[in-house]
Amino acid sequence: MRRVIIAGNWKMYKTPQEGVEMVNDFLPLVKNAKCEAILFPSFLTYDAVKQATNGSNVAVGVQNMHWETEGAFTGEVSPAMLKSMDCEWVIIGHSERRQYFGETDETVNKKLLSALTNNINFILCVGESLVTRENGNAKGFVGDQVKAAVEGFSTDQALKLIVAYEPIWAIGTGKTASKEDAQDMCKHIRLALATEFSEEVAQKISILYGGSVKGDNISELMNQGDIDGALVGGASLQADSFAKIVNY
Ligand code: PGA
């Protein structure tokens, strides 16, 4: 069946030392987890966290990458550099990258194709703003984001997709989408994937929900037919709160 993934996006929080402290508390709490747990620290904190999770059931990735192998791109990190650090996961197209750092559907697509070429697993983020939702255009907008992101994907490549639906108005606001709204959009994303590829392919792709996921709302979200996991920001920063979600 579909992969069940619970991922923690640490954003611009935690020094290497703070990351290791969290992981040392976290690992014993999730050693019997039934899902795949992945932590996404900053580039600088990545290696310390990677070492600290060595031999455990928790994977580690980073929150962004450039699509080129190398070049004059000040401040960027390449897929080759990530591979050299045994990095197996990357988040692509988080709404904060799109909103504050000029990421577009085109750069998201380039990054995804590059991650595929470089054999790095990825979580593609999509999601609408409050204005778009209030205008009644959320599904159209998110469907277009998905379509643009997977431009040029083969069927085999589509099977490597992990998508996270994160409505921007629910991120860091404490306002989780209702389980019905989250399910409705995740189902719509699966439909969009079926249109792009096939129903069979779409049924195999894991779709996560993100936006104010907490220990007390994870179970009802995970009970929805088209939600296969979660991408968690704030509540992934503390070992006990994230363990509660991973052990939902
Ligand atoms: P949040 O962040 O859980 O703090 O809302 C989610 C995310 O940005 O991935």
Image: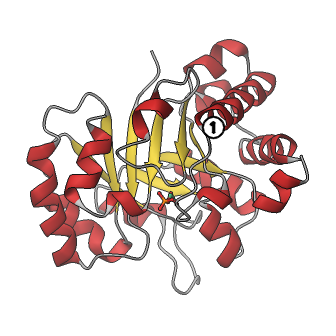
Q: Secondary structure at mark 1?
A: helix
Please tell me in which quadrant of the rendered image residue 188 appears: top right
What residue is shown at x 59% (from left), y 62% (from top)?
67
What residue is shown at x 32% (from left), y 55% (from top)?
39
Residue 238, x across and y down, in percent: 25, 62
- Vertical relation: 93 (above or below) 4: below
What residue is shown at x 66% (from left), y 25% (from top)?
155
Q: Nearer the viewer, residue 146 or 169?
A: 169
Q: Nearer the viewer, residue 12 or 161?
A: 12
| Residue 221 appears in the figure | yes
Q: Nearer the viewer, residue 75 or 133?
A: 133
- Vertical relation: 116 (above or below) 233: above
- Residue labelled with disc 1: 182
Left or right of 196? Residue 208 is left
Q: Nearer the viewer, residue 141 or 145?
A: 141
Residue 127, x across and y down, in percent: 69, 51
Query: Where's the N terminus, which quadrant?
Result: top left
Q: How many marks?
A: 1
Residue 51, x across and y down, in percent: 14, 60
- Tag 1: amino acid: Ala
Query: Where's the C terminus, which quadrant?
Result: top left
Residue 89, x across and y down, in percent: 40, 50
- Vertical relation: 168 (above or below) 230: below
